[in-house]
Every structure is written in C-alpha cells, then in structure tokens.
Image (tube, rainbow, N blue to C red):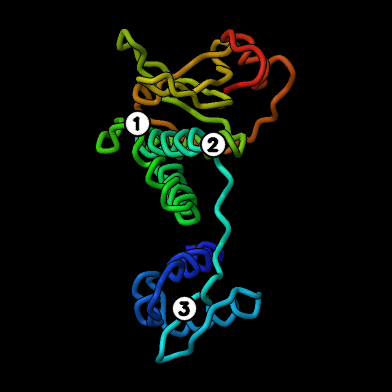
Amino acid sequence: MRRADRLFLVIHALRGRRTALQARGLAETLGVSLRTVYRDIADLQRSGVPIEGEAGVGYLLRKGSDIPPLMFTADELEALVVGTRFVKAFAGKRLHQGAQTALLKIEAVLPPELQARALRSRIFAPTGWRAAASDSIDRLHAAIGAHQVLRLDYRDEAGSQTLREVEPLCLAFWGGAWTLGAWCRLRSDFRNFRPDRIVAFECSGEIFSETSGRDLSAYLRAVGVNGELA
C-alpha cells in the first residue's frame, strides 16, 4: 500500500469517532507495525491534521474538525458509483483494484445522506463474473502503454489460427467482449483482436513509435469513431 493511501485511511478511520482509537487497532486494520502507525500519526500531526491523543491512550480527530465533503451532485455520485462497478466487473485486476480504492476514497468524504443515495443506485454489474480473458487485459494494457510490439497466436471466429505481429493501440469494451485495436503487420492495416480468442501472446522486445496513418487517431477514423473518444 502506498504511504499516501495509508495516511488517507488513518484519517478515514478517525473520522466521526466519539471514543479514541487504539494504535494497535489501526495497525491491524492497515496491516502495518505499531511503529509505522506512530510515525504516520506524528507526520499527520506535524502537517496540521488535528489529531489528539498519545500512544497507549488512543487517537481522535479534534471535535469539530473534519475533511470537507467532495462537491458532487447526486447524479454525479451515482455516475461514479456505477462506473466503478463496471470497471470492477469487466476490467483487468489492476483497474479493478484501482476502482475499489477510488470508491472507498469517495465514500470516505461524503456526507451520510449523499453516500446513502449514491449507493442506492439500481444499476449493477455482475462482479462475480470474470471474462475468460480478464487476466490478459492487464498485460495487454501494459503493452499498449509501453508501445511494445506483440506476437499473437490468434484464432478467429471460424477457428482458423494465425500468427500475427501487431502494434497495440487501445482496448475497447463493447458490452459483451473486449477488443484489442492494433496495426497488424501481416495485413498492413488496422485490425481488431478479441483477447478471448488470443491463444497466447508475448512481447517481441521491439518498441514501436506511433506514426501518422497508423496511430490511434488513424485507427479511430478507420473504425468510424470521430471526435473525442468516450
């Protein structure tokens, strides 16, 4: 866990409490040592966070002190909650974890009435379901970010299997399946590959540069997406 996230969770644990929270309880919750908790509390106090208490007694946020709520409307909050539900259900593990952490941070600073309203949304995503290709989404995402040329062992809809060398440009989710948008060197054109039909893939070790005519903008035009990508 990043130190910034840990400090945020320390403050969150102290918010709204009427009784002191023991350092040992914080340590168990965060999965860190007592020494780390004492150091984090001291750092927060030095930075101006109004935490009162001491080792062996426990800690409280000074009465009347709190973190101001985020200024979201009810519709904006519901959009964020629903969005994180879909990311958690359908994205790779890294984005799943990021969505979970983001949602916890949003909920932590909301007034109770707004938090309750946002969580009452009747739009759900099946979080228990995991697509067959979900484990590969993180690897493909990383390759896109690093501009790594990929070698794909790919099986198309008819079952024909080919070897492709591609320059990956983006991932898109179409409500039922993911696709990898890429420049295919075999076909010398843009192609879409479904991750659940990729038998295996590996990085070739080559780094590519996006050039005019075969970059993301050109790909989006080729597939009929104009303007800003939603």
State the SS at label 1.
loop
Rendered image: mark on residue 133: 1
The extreme left residue here reads: 128
The extreme bottom residue here reads: 56
Distance from the alpha carbon under mark 2 to that under mark 3: 45 Å
Q: Nearer the viewer, residue 172 or 63?
A: 63
Q: Quadrant of the C terminus?
A: top right
Task: Please provide percent x and percent y for residue 123.
Answer: 34, 29
Q: Callout 3, which amino acid?
A: Leu
Q: Is residue 132 left or right of residue 21?
A: left
Q: Callout 1, which amino acid?
A: Ala
The tag earlier along the polypeptide, 2 or 3, is 3
Circle 3 sits on which residue?
A: 60
Mark in front: 1 vs 2: 1
Callout 2–callout 3 Cβ contact below 8 Å:
no
Circle 2 sits on which residue?
A: 143
